Image: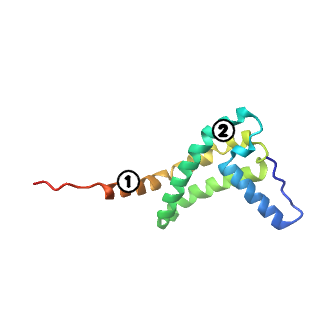
Amino acid sequence: VIVQAGTDNPFTFLKNTAVAFVFAAFGPFPWHFQQSHHSFALLETIPWLALFSLTALGVWRERIRWKSMFPVLLYALGVLAFISVFFVSNFGVYMRIRIPAFLALFSLLPFGLELFARKRQETVVRIPKE
């Protein structure tokens, strides 16, 4: 997938950069595959989408602690922004380069897991002892 920068118009540049950021963060998508052996990339992409949604939910719920999460989020979003501007035309390259951003975001995963642990604890039925 080739996304042109579109430097002649600022709105085109912002739109194309946003599309490239989504491709770099969540892609490649199944409709980007040209050959069947590219589908092995889904083995990484599908679990990443599930873990990212859990991480994003936890970060959103614990946004009161934004000062402790800010450096990690800034680093991960910076890496993904860099990839989206320079490497989005080759998904093999950006899948390897985005791994440090994923590892940084995975450090925020316990915020989402804590939310599920609380929900599970609330739903457990307690039987009173006689």
Quadrant where the C terminus is found in the figure: bottom left
Q: Residue at x 82, y 48 (%)?
A: 2
Residue 88 horizontal/vertical position (percent)? 76, 48
User: In the depicted view, which residue is nearer to us: 77 or 26?
Assistant: 26
The image's mark for residue 41 is 2
Residue 96, picture quadrant: top right
The kind of residue tagged 1 is Ala
Instruction: Label 2: state its secondary structure.
Output: helix
Return the mark for residue 61: none
Q: Secondary structure at mark 1?
A: helix
Return the x and y of residue 70 as percentages of the image width and height.
56, 61
Left or right, 9 with respect to 65, comes to right
Q: Position of residue 20 (x, y in %)?
A: 74, 54
Q: Which residue is mark 1?
A: 117
Instruction: Please give the name of the residue rendered at 74% of the width and 57% of the height, measured from the top-left corner.
Output: 19
Residue most extreme to the left:
130
Residue projecting furthest to the top = 37
Residue 8 appears left or right of 23:
right
Residue in view at x 71 percent, y 55 percent: 21
